[in-house]
Image (cartoon, rainbow, N blue to C red):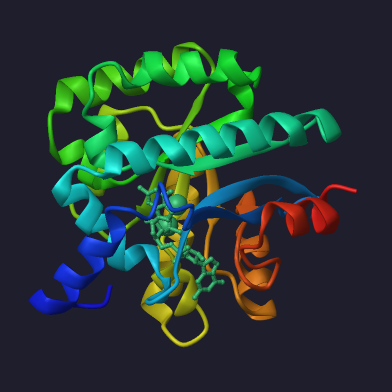
Amino acid sequence: QTQLNIEQRYHLESNLVDALKNGELSLNYQPFFCLKNNKVIGAEALLRWNNPILGNVPPDQFINLAERNGQINEIGNFVLHTAIAQAAKWFVIQPQNFRIAINISPVQFRNSSFAEHIENLLSLYNLPASALEIEITEGILLQDEHVAQHTIKKLQQFGVRVSLDDFGTGYSSLSYLQKYSFNTLKIDRCFITNIEKNEQDRELSKAIIAIGKKLDMHVIAEGVETQAQDDFIKSEECDYGQGYLYGKPVTAGLFEKSYLS
Ligand code: C2E
Ligand code: CA
Ligand code: CA
């Protein structure tokens, strides 16, 4: 994550205020694949901000600003509405094995009616709960343990999957696996990136895949860029893969053309 100085932050923040109403925000979709049959089984929605002056601003630079000034609720809602509406259309084209993965900020997740909100959106757009996966990070679990536990359970009760993103980068990750029941574990990109050069990362990736399997979770490797990385995760029987090797994040139109027809 790039560190911005106070002036840059101020500049971004003042432009971000109007980004949504000026139509500067949009979503890209990156495919993820089943490694057994190499089929697309879903898409992760990734937020994009294109500002006439600033150009393309990466989410790593503006999401934490939006979290601090509260705008993330509005922006997060835009993401939920857009991605769920889009997924409902794609689900019609590919009803078997298609799901949309949506990143949720801890700020959104903290809201005690988050699970109901999701339930309402699913019925509004007519998307089956099984076609939605909510991606959260450890940051969520560091807050109010009971609220988080309750929300995760509720989501799973109506059939929404919950995945733990960036796994392996935070701390005390293993105790979270015991406390919460995730459907999917996403191995952080940094492990995958170093698989070829770093023996330790290779061993850790193996261990994470094994832990996921033991605990009945699906494991997805993200940031797969090379054939050697693909070979490795396949030999370890990792379930799913995502990364530039398989497909970069693209617009909805391009996603549909490339992967769903
Ligand atoms: P993330 O959830 O870990 O998303 C994966 C990031 O890795 C994306 O960056 C994606 O473009 C990038 N990526 C995918 N495959 C590869 C690869 O093979 N190599 C490399 N080098 N990168 C790859 P992006 O789109 O810049 O998003 C960065 C982060 O911003 C995301 O990390 C997520 O934490 C956050 N984010 C994005 N969209 C949203 C959103 O709608 N809501 C929230 N709360 N956070 C979001
Ligand atoms: Ca993610
Ligand atoms: Ca991630």
Q: Which residue lies furthest to the bottom in this view?
A: 197
Q: Give me the residue at 21% from left, 62% from top.
A: 14
Side of 247 where 92 appears, left or right:
right
For the N terminus, which image quadrant?
bottom left
Q: Residue furthest right?
A: 261
Q: Give me the residue at 51% from left, 32% from top.
A: 81
Query: How many numbered callouts?
Result: 0
- Image location of residue 255, percent across then percent down: 74, 55
Residue nearer the viewer, 161 or 20? 20
Q: Which residue lies furthest to the left in this view?
A: 6
Vertical placement of 253 versus 143: above or below? below
Q: Give me the residue at 40% from left, 34% from top.
A: 77
Residue 104 visible in the snapshot: no
Vertical placement of 226 versus 155: above or below? below
- Image location of residue 228, percent across then percent down: 65, 79
Q: In which quarter of the image is residue 153?
A: top left
- Image location of residue 219, percent across then percent down: 53, 47
Side of 219 where 232 appears, left or right:
right
Ligand 1 appears in which quadrant?
bottom left
Residue nearer the viewer, 66 or 210? 66
- Image location of residue 243, percent across then percent down: 60, 66
Side of 250 where 83 appears, left or right:
left
Residue 171 visible in the snapshot: yes
Residue nearer the viewer, 219 or 107? 107
Side of 227 where 181 appears, left or right:
left
